[in-house]
Amino acid sequence: MEAIVDANHRALAGDAAAGLRPDEFADSLPIVALTCIDARLNALLPQVLGVPADQFVWLRNAGNIITGTVSSTMRSLALACAVKGGREIAIIGHTDCAVGRMTTMELIERFAALGIDRHSLPESINEYFGTFSSERSNVIKAADLVRGSPLISGRVAVHGLLVNTETGKVDWLVNGYQTLGNAGPRGAESAPAPGKGVETTESLGGFKMSDMKFPEGQIGDAIARIEPPPSPPPPSGTPMLAGWAERVDIVPPAGAKSPPGGSKPPAPLPPRIPLPPPEKRRVYFRR
């Protein structure tokens, strides 16, 4: 994560050589990331992190919110580590989050416009939908809940990041390396009480793995039958890093021998961390 943040900041400063050699960090990959559903992140991640797509396990929900230490979102994070081999977890928030800006009354009005009356909504709108006032504090809280979950190994680093949707800058809010080895007790106190919120949580003292029920059969059997064909490469001129995954493997590993009959050629520079294109704004004049 230090290399990711450093490369991102150097790219923003104009360093043409800024980039990441993922092969040098195989022990930390893949990264499991929980982000918001905001469409602006589609063009930013995982490129601004410098991580190839096949080493980025991407989970999403509105506001990158976690409601409890044994919630369904935590279940997905746990399975991403146990089944997909995730080595580190990153809770990635973003600036200008619509979920954070939404007030209770605005949310009620949005649902009313869809034909959903107030009496059909939960009693506590804020608690159920997990609205928040600060993107930074929301990321920190989520990372703390993940680190306190009994489903997440203490050997998995849990980080908190904030991405600027205009510049692509990544801020490191929670350093997961500082809490490696800690799992379980932290975060239980801040979990919602049983029976409240979108996902029910239990105190860690009463939690039993035997109480959790999972579908019968092997995980991925159904998915393997409906797996879509691989996406075609992005067209030339794409503002993000086109062909990142194809270029990351060309960097020779450390200690590689020189080719016979000549001196060792210089190692190519790592792929440059992409930055988002300038945002186009429309200006309207009132007559």
Image: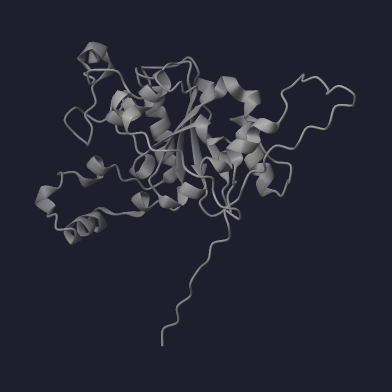
Residue 6: tell me if it is visible: no
Q: In which quadrant of the rendered view does residue 265 lie?
A: top right
Outermost residue on the bottom side: it is 287
Q: Quadrant of the C terminus?
A: bottom left
Outermost residue on the right side: it is 262
Residue 129: tell me if it is visible: yes
Is 49 positioned to the left or the right of 41 in the image? right
Name the spot of residue 64 as percent of width and height, x first: 38, 40
Q: Quadrant of the N terminus?
A: top right
Tell which of 175 and 222 is nearer to you: 222
Above or below, 47 against 219 in this view is below
Name the spot of residue 176 as percent of width and height, x first: 51, 26
Is 127 positioned to the left or the right of 275 in the image? left
Above or below, 91 against 114 in this view is above
Q: Image point 46% across, 52% down: which residue?
A: 40
Tell which of 191 and 213 is nearer to you: 213
Q: In which quadrant of the rendered view does residue 278 lie?
A: bottom right
Tell which of 164 and 48 is nearer to you: 48
Is 52 positioned to the left or the right of 183 in the image? right
Model colouring: one colour
Tell which of 269 and 65 is nearer to you: 269
Name the spot of residue 24 as percent of width and height, x first: 66, 24
Is 30 positioned to the left or the right of 204 in the image? right
Q: Image point 54% across, 25% down: which residue?
A: 29
Q: Image point 24% across, 41% down: which residue?
A: 127
Name the spot of residue 122 as percent of width and height, x first: 15, 44
Outermost residue on the left side: it is 119
The mark total stands at 0
